[in-house]
Image: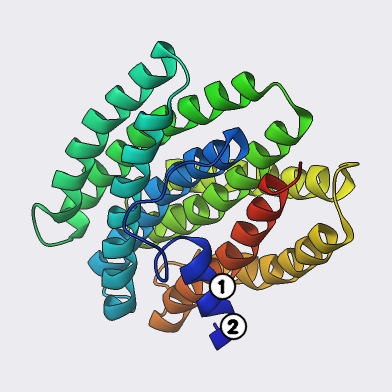
Amino acid sequence: MNRRQMSALALGLGLTGLPAWAQVKDLNDAINKAGRQRMLSQRAAKAYMALALQTQPAQAEKILSQSMALFDRQLVELKAFAPSPTIRDTYVKLEAAWSDYKEKLIGKAPSLAGAEAVIAQSEAVLALAHQGTGQLEQTSGQPVGRLVNLAGRQRMLSQRLAKYSYASAGKIAQGAAQTEIGKARTEFLAGMQTLLTAPEATPRIKQELKLGEQQWLFFDAAINSTTGAAPSKEALSNVMTTSENLLTVLNEVTGLYAALA
């Protein structure tokens, strides 16, 4: 990842240069942040798996720490913003599921023995985060709200693919991992096409999506390189690098859609 991309990711994900407390600005911003919680649920699991596989440990540790801190912060913001009791209830439930997830992520040193429980809890957190995002989109009732949700889901899929790529490499539920990789691939490609052809897509958004398509080729190749019986350290490292590069672009796309009036 080059310096521009790293800066964009850090700023876009809210990791640097922002105050410790940032209110949700409007419904599009809420959908963006709610969707980012989905991504963080998968990114944290990816980092855990990378640590268990001893892949880029310094980078994985940083990603895990940043992801957990950002999830915590956004959860507070989304609970405070919740425009209805039903949506607030979703975030109360998410808070409980997240608490259980954090214990599994950092309660013990990351290991392949603990990976199955981490993956299972990442799914529970993802389901509630997705529920909240959908509720906020419905509250918006605007076509752009659906696109912010969809673009944000692309971020999640990039990290989900990496998570299951590492699960397969670690011989964790290999059959299920390959099934999830196949489903996520199909959904990701369909999502890119929808975003690219949406009437609301500006020239800037289309430019970023084209860049995303290029990054996807590198990421997809990295995933394919881990499907062997014993993936190399280089192959596993490439999954980390390319998944982060793709996330940078997808986060930019989501932010651009969220900024549309």
Residue type at numbered disc 2? Arg
Residue type at numbered disc 1? Ala
Circle number at residue 250: none
Q: Check whether the beta carbons of the residues at disc 1 and disc 2 lie within 8 A of each other.
A: yes
Q: Residue at x 44, y 61 (%)?
A: 14
Quadrant (top left, top right, bottom left, bottom right) of the C terminus: top right
> Mark 1 to mark 2: distance in Å?
6 Å
Disc 1 marks which residue?
A: 8
Which is nearer the eye, 107 or 111?
Answer: 107
Measuring from the top left, give residue 6's x and y in whole percent: 51, 78
Measuring from the top left, give residue 1's x and y in whole percent: 54, 82
Circle number at residue 4: 2
Q: Residue at x 77, y 60 (%)?
A: 209
Position of residue 20 relative to residue 100, above or below, is below
Kind of element beneath mark 1: helix
Q: Is residue 213 left or right of residue 14?
A: right
Q: Residue at x 26, y 63 (%)?
A: 65
Total of numbered circles in the picture? 2
Circle 1 crowding by C-alpha within 10 Å: few under 14, some 14–19, many from 20? some
The answer to whether one can see residue 2 in this image is no
Which is nearer the eye, 139 or 42?
Answer: 139
Q: Residue furthest left?
A: 108
Measuring from the top left, give residue 180's x and y in whole percent: 52, 42
